[in-house]
């Protein structure tokens, strides 16, 4: 019953802890390494127009659904203009208004985005378009193109792709040439394709977006083709027939409606500029979690005050040291004074640094042990003797600090950070072991305690481990599972294999 219960708990804790960690890395995008930077793109639209002197209203489409990107920030710079933002289906529109618009007016819209694996898409379900009546010779050409695509396709996606491959063929037939000659630019080309797809009542529309491949000024919106297959909108490049939204394509708006509408003035220009910067990936992931309304945003250590964060950065490393003690004592067989005394010493090493910490620890224990042997001759009771050792340890630490101050050895002043009660108990237990089992066992346990403390220090000061435990505290469940699993271990330890090596030789003989 005990073994089965432990196995169930070990599996359950590991699954929960690793699943939450996997979700935070893959869905929320939290990095597993500290100080990882990611590209952040800032796109700015600058609008210049001249007012007529009376009321002016400027309406402008804004990015709404941006697959492949995560919106980090959004700014409107509009001076004395009133601003209202509203959704219009799959689009979003800003409306600037002012009572009196004279001379040149400038409006700015700025959005900062980062690439993201979080999925998002358009949720609208369009109606089937009515089949238009094409004039000749376009009717015959369109019918030929549609018939040829129908025989080589199985659904809306493959049907659209077949049509695009025909229209973009390097060796076009006379039907395709008819449409190529008629289309003047990219927008007209996409509209021609939409018109052709209307012949088989496939809902289609234009997707406008801007390229973020490089920092640039005077960028332009580019059109892509979208068709609806009854469940979702599918995107195609109208010139290459490739399916999907390009990696560096920031979706802006959909449909054939004009990008802007101005009343009460005359537009001068709309200028798009793109710039690239870098930001820590963990900040980007936190913004993504807030955007997705994830519960891990509210229950994150990063949401705590800075003082509390610094405290938990230290406390979350203690379980790492505890697991090291479990592994060293259960599987290796190293003896220590006290169960978790080495971890407390390792915490002190964080302030003294490793070399000076080992020297100070050895010096205090050595002096304390000599004085403890003298106290044994005085035949004192246990509690007064322990109290005396604590006071003696404090005196030794004080003397070391005074001498180091005179020698201008500032690092030795951190001796006051050692846990004095733990040092006193170490001295007491080492002296008892010395008397009962001899100096060899006492020194072995002393060196074992120091060795485990050094391992704990190296693990607890590792920046990668500190970052992982702080950002993914659910891994504490995995550490708990390791301790539960180790608690049922009853096999040989490494030191016992060395201890009984002679028996193996006897069995071979």
Image (spheres, rainbow, N blue to C red):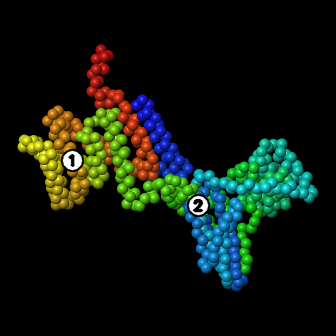
Q: Is 73 situated left or right of 497 in this image?
A: right
In the displayed structure, would residue 507 be above or below residue 2? above
In the displayed structure, would residue 366 be above or below residue 212? above
Does residue 109 show up? yes
How dense is the environment of label 2, judged by Cα within 10 Å: few (below 14), some, or many (20 and up)?
Answer: many
> Is residue 420 or residue 147 the one in the foreground?
420
How dense is the environment of label 1, judged by Cα within 10 Å: few (below 14), some, or many (20 and up)?
Answer: many
Q: Which residue is mark 2?
A: 71
Q: Which residue is mark 1?
A: 423
> Is residue 239 or residue 324 the one in the foreground?
324
Please tell me in which quadrant of the rendered image residue 206 appears: bottom right
Q: Position of residue 460 (x, y in %)?
A: 35, 48
Mark 2, secondary structure of its residue: strand
Chain-order first, disc 2 or disc 1: 2
Image quarter hosting the N terminus: top left
Does residue 176 show up? no
Q: Position of residue 256 (x, y in %)?
A: 76, 63
């Amino acid at each position: 019953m005990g073994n089965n219960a432990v196995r169930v708990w070990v599996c359950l804790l590991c699954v929960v802890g690793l699943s939450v960690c996997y979700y935070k890395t893959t869905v929320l995008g939290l990095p597993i390494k500290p100080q990882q930077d990611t590209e952040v793109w800032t796109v700015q639209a600058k609008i210049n127009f001249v007012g007529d002197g009376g009321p002016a209203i400027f309406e402008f489409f804004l990015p709404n659904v941006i697959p492949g990107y995560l919106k980090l920030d959004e700014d409107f710079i509009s001076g004395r203009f009133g601003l209202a933002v509203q959704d219009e289906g799959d689009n979003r529109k800003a409306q600037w208004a002012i009572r009196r618009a004279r001379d040149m007016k400038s409006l700015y819209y700025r959005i900062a985005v980062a690439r993201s694996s979080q999925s998002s898409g358009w949720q609208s379900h369009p109606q089937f378009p009515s089949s238009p009546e094409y004039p000749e010779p376009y009717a015959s050409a369109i019918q030929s193109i549609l018939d040829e695509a129908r025989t080589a396709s199985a659904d809306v996606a493959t049907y659209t792709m077949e049509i695009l491959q025909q229209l973009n063929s390097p060796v076009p037939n006379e039907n395709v040439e008819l449409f190529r000659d008629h289309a003047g630019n990219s927008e007209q080309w996409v509209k021609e394709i939409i018109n052709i797809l209307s012949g088989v009542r496939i809902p289609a529309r234009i997707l406008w977006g801007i390229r973020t491949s490089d920092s640039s000024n005077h960028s332009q919106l580019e059109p892509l083709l979208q068709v609806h297959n009854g469940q979702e909108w599918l995107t195609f490049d109208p010139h290459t027939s490739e399916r999907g939204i390009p990696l560096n394509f920031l979706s802006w708006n959909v449909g054939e409606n004009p990008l802007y509408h101005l009343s009460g003035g005359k537009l001068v220009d709309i200028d798009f500029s793109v710039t690239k910067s870098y930001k820590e990936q963990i900040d980007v992931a936190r913004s993504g979690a807030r955007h997705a309304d994830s519960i891990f945003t509210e229950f994150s250590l990063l949401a705590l005050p800075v003082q509390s964060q610094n405290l938990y950065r230290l406390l979350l490393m203690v379980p790492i040291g505890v697991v090291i003690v479990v592994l060293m004592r259960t599987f290796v067989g190293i003896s220590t004074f006290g169960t978790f005394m080495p971890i407390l010493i390792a915490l002190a090493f964080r302030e003294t640094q490793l070399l000076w910490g080992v020297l100070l620890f050895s010096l205090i224990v050595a002096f304390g042990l000599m004085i403890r042997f003298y106290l044994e001759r005085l035949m004192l009771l246990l509690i007064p003797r322990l109290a005396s050792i604590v006071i003696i340890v404090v005196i030794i630490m004080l003397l070391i600090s005074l001498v180091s101050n005179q020698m201008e050895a500032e690092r030795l002043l951190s001796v006051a950070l050692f846990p004095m009660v733990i040092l006193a108990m170490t001295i007491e237990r080492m002296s008892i072991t010395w008397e009962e089992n001899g100096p060899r066992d006492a020194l072995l346990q002393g060196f074992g305690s120091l060795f485990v403390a050094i391992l704990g220090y190296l693990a607890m000061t590792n920046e990668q481990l500190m970052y992982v435990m702080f950002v993914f505290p659910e891994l504490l469940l995995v550490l708990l599972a390791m301790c539960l699993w180790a608690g049922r271990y009853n096999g040989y330890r490494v030191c016992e294999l060395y201890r009984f090596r002679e028996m193996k030789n006897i069995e071979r003989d």
